Amino acid sequence: MAAKTKSELLDITSKEFGKLEKLMETIDVNAALDKSGQEASIKDVIAHRAHWIDLFLGWYADGVAGKVVYFPAEGYKWNDLKRYNSDLRKRQSNLDWPKAVAMLRTNYGKLTDFINNCSEEELYGGKMRGANNAWTPGRWAEAAGASHFRSASKYLRSSLKRGK
């Protein structure tokens, strides 16, 4: 069930990041970089989640500024996500495991700062400007944060299980 208030959003974001953080602490470099026949390594998934927080914050800022908001990014449509994510993995290929983890932690901080600095009305009072759908900024923040943290945790657990 999606958060409907700022307090719920902060709680679920913190809870899901905490679970992911605990899992990340158990991952060594070799496990983080191993793809074992998968398209993405654990490092790739963590770097991806960090990137999407930046995407969301950019969408929000562009919408508030009255600029064109490119969803998910300029030159891509939602049905191009597979290609976008593949291109993103290529752009992030130089990241090592510690940098990917640091980037996620930094962007988690940016996301929680964003949430804390928004009013209830800004988060849930109406659709996000420029988004071309009915989702509120709070719902988008949850998608970029807590929902992505939850799916990353699931991926990490599955990868760790596969590696044993």
Image (tube, rainbow, N blue to C red):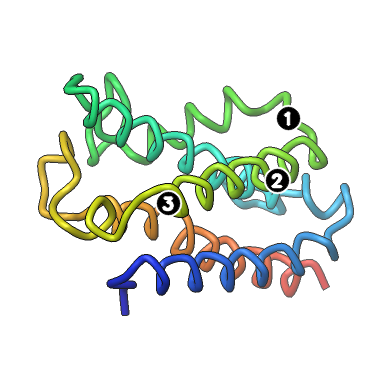
* Quarter of image, res 80: top left
Distance between mark 2 and mark 3 Cα atoms: 17 Å
Q: Can you tell which mark lies on residue 43?
A: 2
Q: Where is residue 96 in the image (x, y as percent from the top left)?
A: 79, 34
Q: Which amino acid does label 1 sit on?
A: Leu
Residue at image position (38%, 33%) is: 83
- Rate crowding at label 3 as few (under 14), some (14 to 19) or many (20 or more) other CA atoms within 10 Å: many
- Rate crowding at label 1 as few (under 14), some (14 to 19) or many (20 or more) other CA atoms within 10 Å: some
Helix, strand or loop under label 3: helix
Q: Where is residue 122 in the image (x, y as percent from the top left)?
A: 25, 50
* Quarter of image, res 157: bottom right
Residue 47 appears left or right of 115 = right
Front in this rendered view, residue 32 or 71: 71
Distance between mark 1 and mark 3 Cα atoms: 20 Å
Please tell me whether mark 2 or mark 3 is closer to you in this view.
3
Q: Which amino acid does label 3 sit on?
A: Ala
Front in this rendered view, residue 144 or 13: 13
Residue occupied by mark 1: 95
Please tell me whether mark 1 or mark 3 is closer to you in this view.
3
> Would you say the residues marked 1 and 3 are in contact, meaning their CB atoms lie under 8 Å apart?
no
Q: Name the N-terminal-most of marks 1 and 2.
A: 2
- Rate crowding at label 2 as few (under 14), some (14 to 19) or many (20 or more) other CA atoms within 10 Å: many
* Placement of the N terminus among the 4 image quadrants: bottom left
Helix, strand or loop under label 2: helix
* Placement of the C terminus among the 4 image quadrants: bottom right
Distance between mark 1 and mark 2 Cα atoms: 8 Å
Residue at image position (76%, 60%) is: 24
Helix, strand or loop under label 1: loop
* Quarter of image, res 135: bottom left
Please determine whether, in this image, residue 89 is positioned above or below residue 52: above
> Would you say the residues marked 1 and 2 are in contact, meaning their CB atoms lie under 8 Å apart?
yes
Q: Can you tell which mark lies on residue 144?
A: 3
